Amino acid sequence: MKTNILPAIRLTVATLVLFCVVYPAIVWAIAQLAPNNGKGEVVVSGGKKYYANVGQQFTDDKYFNSRPSAVDYNAAGSAGSNKGPSNPEYLQTVQTRLDTLLVHNPGVNKEDVPVELVTASGSGLDPDISPAGARVQAARIAKVRGVSENTVADLIEKHTQGPLLGIFGPSHVNVLKLNLALDQIK
Amino acid sequence: MFAITVVLAIPFGSYIAKVYAGDKTLLDPVFNPLDKLLYKVSGIDEKREMNWKQHMFALLTINVVWFLLGIFVLMNQSWLPLNPDANPDQTADLAFNTSISFIVNCNLQHYSGESGVSYLSQLFLMFLQFVSAGTGMAAAAIVFIALKNRTTEKLGNFWALLVKSCTRILLPLSILVGSILAFNGIPMTFEGKDTIVNMQGDTVQVSTGPVAGFVAIKHLGTNGGGFYGTNSAHPLENPNYFTNMLEMFSQMIIPLAMIFSFGYFLKRKKFGWMVFGVMTAGFLLLVVPTMVWEINGNPALGKMGVDISSGVMEGKEVRFGSATSAFWSIATTVISTGSVNSMHDSTMPLSGMTQLLAMMTNAFYGGCGAGILNFFIFIILAVFISGLMVGRTPELFGKKIEAREMKIAMIVALLHPLMILAGTALAAAFPGITSANLNNPGFHGFSEMLYEYTSSAANNGSGFEGLGDNNPWWNITTGIVLILSRYLPIIGPVAIAGLLAKKKFVPESAGTLPTDSATFGVMVLAVIVIIAALSFFPALTLGPIAEYFSMK
């Protein structure tokens, strides 16, 4: 045992320097060359800064609404609801969300509401909705803003990100970027 | 994607075998001086060969040093430097749990990264992610060395194996992956939380930090502890589908490469392929049905009339979708990474069951080094059972397997179910303490407790995160499970290998049972399935299976 203690302590100190100081310093230095100096991707619009990948709360009828969130999109923290699929209280919550959504979007059939609009994301900060989730809100947006539904549909089309290399992953729409573009039409 | 990882794992496995054998590699000009410096500073004679007991003493000693240092850092982080968000100290029981769970490569996190640790603590935990993965790999390397065809007690130097695993395997890959991640929008900064005003006028904060470096090693070292509370579901920890693929690749590459390096090191490539075949069969048996269940969606929501064609989306991110998240949930549980890109608590009951089974078998791929060690136990059992079936003395690689080795193998194999089932039984026996921590009622609540102990015993670290686990009960009981389930499954296989190494080598003859055949592979798979099924079926019936039938 005694033969091991000193080398163990000295090796710990030496590797601490390597992995706690040198390694992060190397990655940090390389990250300085990355977009926004490695502080995360941001969008600047109208003098305000937003994080492109961090979802925001959108509940106004004039904006495309984002998904429900367990942390109300405050990125000081992050959390999912962690509700089990058979939890009665949870199923009631989803039903309420669906009813609210139908009230705000008259004329929409519930069969057309994609499930992600009434369920909370894993992080509580999901920046995206599916193209179907955006299209189902198009009529409401057009009416509130007094623009044609075609304009809104084109905008959704333009902001839809297809699968990576055309094959990997689902199509999705960044709600923040879509709403920023929405504020620009007039 | 999976195919690319396998294709790259083969040459990488050959590289790992060369590193442990001390053969020349391309990276020697960089790492020979670095390693020499580390040995010199630490006063280590890397040429001094150790027997298996000396190896284990060295391993345990340095782990104790890390543990004590970890407790100190976590309980004093409020006044130590690099705490821009003024996060408070951890309580004693939480620091105990966190420190243990990071030295044992589990990364069960009973805190949220945004508020529970300072940047200094994050960096220290990152250090533990390197060295705990290195510990597992070094232990596997001892087994590799012991199984070479010769009779010896000398099994290399533990310090050298540990240092080489960290510097030559984990470090270069981490720098590469970390840099690519930083270029994809993952923060790597030492500034504190950023305050922004949203488009709708809400003021919110955004947590940043040295995330990219952390995420790289958390996957490469199969640690899985997230920088943020929601791990790789967080859009700053895993911003797009490309980073998702890269992180998946990172967590699979070393466990896969270790299998092939086993074959290369022993010059028994076919044996490596047998191991790979069994593990892949087990992985596919778990992952395919899980993906089907998740893609089919939650029928309870389908009854409400919404469109569930995109699958189960509660607890999932739109940019990954249900299929990818289901794949990840099984990959992370078989490999003992425990990082998540969706909330397992909200997956369908039977998906929860396959996630649990992935950790209960704990032998398909497995963590850095630890996977091979667990699988080694099953190989010993399979050799013994099939030896009895055909009436021959069981032997592995020309060494006889006798009563002493079998006893050790049985203790290790039975420890895993004991920890999980006894832990869950205790928690269920004291509902006064534990029931208030559950986030869901009924059978699902039971699954939350079962998952917590399974994840601890498998050193996985994922969770049914609805469980309110930051209190003395969960911190202490899972801490104990973590210690026993980490060190005994390391000491056991190393002891067996050490005992085998001392024995006389009997050349293989026509009477030897070949261990690199498909038949033997089926035998190993059968042993794993029987042990898992018999031990865990009753518990699974009370949790996920009961919930599944209650939803019909």
Image (spheres, grey):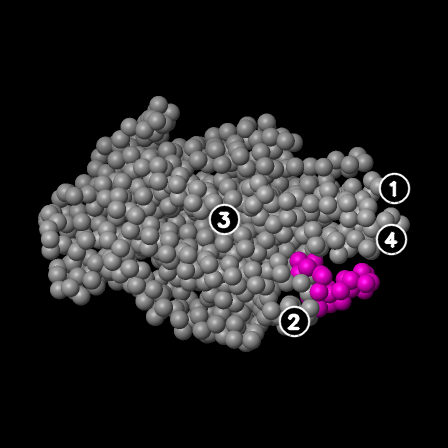
User: Which of the 4 quarters of the picture holds residue A6?
Assistant: top left
Determine which residue is flagged by label 4: A144
Give me the chain letter of mark 1.
A
Badge 1 amino acid = Lys
Question: How many marks overall?
Answer: 4
Q: Nearer the viewer, mark 3 or mark 1?
A: 1
Badge 4 amino acid = Val
Badge 2 amino acid = Lys
Q: Nearer the viewer, mark 2 or mark 3?
A: 2
Q: Both on one chain, marks 1 and 4? A: yes
Q: Of helix, strand and loop, which mostly describes the magenta segment?
A: helix
Disc 1 residue crowd, few under 14, some 14–19, many 20+, Cα 10 Å: few
Determine which residue is flagged by label 3: B225
A167 left or right of A159? left
Disc 3 residue crowd, few under 14, some 14–19, many 20+, Cα 10 Å: many
Q: Position of residue B242 (x, y in %)?
A: 55, 41
Determine which residue is flagged by label 1: A186
Q: Secondary structure at mark 1?
A: loop
Q: Which residues are magenta?
A: A93-117
Badge 3 amino acid = Gly
Give me the chain letter of mark 3.
B
Q: Both on one chain, marks 1 and 2? A: no
Q: Is the Cβ of the residue at disc 1 closer than 8 Å to that at disc 2?
A: no
- How far is mark 2 from mark 3, CA to CA? 37 Å
Q: Both on one chain, marks 4 and 2? A: no
B131 left or right of B525? right
Mark seen at residue B303 = 2
- How far is mark 3 from mark 1, CA to CA? 47 Å
Q: Secondary structure at mark 4?
A: helix
B264 left or right of A154? left
